[in-house]
Amino acid sequence: MFSAARAVISISLVCLPGAVLAQAGPSEPQIIAAAPMTKINVGTRKLAGQMVANLRVDAEGKVRDVAVVEDTTERGFDSQLVKVLQSARFRPAIDANGRTIESTIEMKLELRASTAGAPKPVASKPDPQLTDKEKARIRRMKCSDFAWEWKLIRDQAGDAAATEFMPRIAITMYIAARNEAGEYVDTKVWKASAKALKQSAERCGENPAAPFWDGVLKSVLDEAVAK
């Protein structure tokens, strides 16, 4: 195993042009954890160590470049771990003007017995204020913002979309509001969440200018989990 960083590996692909008007920004890229990713062949190698890399994520959420800056895994995992990082999918970064943009984010892959042959990339330097920033962003979202983002997540994560970062935070915000009112309906809300998010997207499609959080999601969940 190598305790020091190994040589930088940079894999570049052709970038696709064009940014999407997403509106609810600014926001750093968010990995879609449930999107399918390349698996690794462990063989007889030891599951230990980590790879840290800077990923260049394009305006469509695809990884266009992987630059490894640290690798403490057993030799022979390098190329496989780079392929895992290449296969990751993101909700792309959004600038202050509401456009999806190319950006760079530092991610890490940890090899442990629990990850086996399917390690998942996570941010190597998590933002301690990320949840509060996301709550504020969700409150600013119009229906058009949510519908765009939900479709992007659904296309990659399928039925697990409700567990992704943005929708998960939106649901926890609603639960917190009900708890503050003395209504402890956590289990019921989580059970209804996937259907409620899908229904919210449908309603948002009918009224894209409506506020997502105050105008749609809370109403849908109020109907799903009666007070």
Image (cartoon, rainbow, N blue to C red):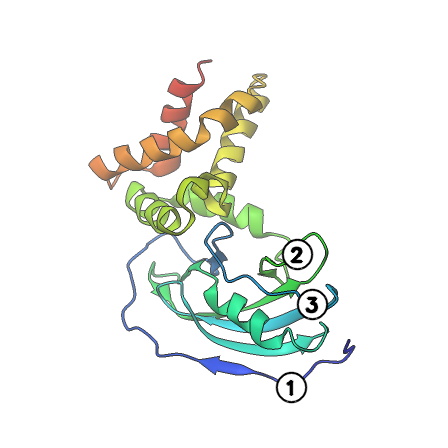
Instruction: Indicate the position of residue 108 as horizontal and vertical percent values.
Output: 62, 65
Q: CA gap, disc 2 to disc 1?
A: 25 Å
Would residue 82 be seen by someone viewing this image from the given angle?
A: yes
Task: Return the mark for residue 116.
Answer: 2
Residue 198 sits above or below residue 101 on the image: above
Mark 3 lies on a secondary structure that is strand
* Residue located at (39% from left, 35% from top): 213
* Residue located at (48% from left, 81% from top): 11
Closer to us: 165 or 114: 114
Q: Is the residue marked by circle 3 packed among few (<14), some (14-19), or many (20+) residues within 10 Å? A: some
Closer to us: 205 or 39: 39
Kind of residue at disc 1: Ala
Quadrant of the rendered image containing residue 25: bottom left
Task: Return the mark for residue 136.
Answer: none
* Residue located at (35% from left, 44% from top): 146
Closer to us: 115 or 161: 115
Mark 2 lies on a secondary structure that is loop
Q: CA gap, disc 2 to disc 3?
A: 13 Å
Residue under numbered circle 1: 7
Residue at the extreme left: 206
Residue under numbered circle 3: 50
Instruction: Indicate the position of residue 76 as horizontal and vertical percent values.
Output: 66, 77
Q: Which tag, 1 or 3, sits closer to the chain's start?
A: 1
Residue 198 sits above or below residue 161 on the image: above
On screen, residue 33 versus residue 5, left or right, reads: left
Q: Which tag, 2 or 1, sits closer to the chain's start?
A: 1
Q: Which tag, 2 or 3, sits closer to the chain's start?
A: 3
Q: Nearer the viewer, mark 2 or mark 1?
A: 2
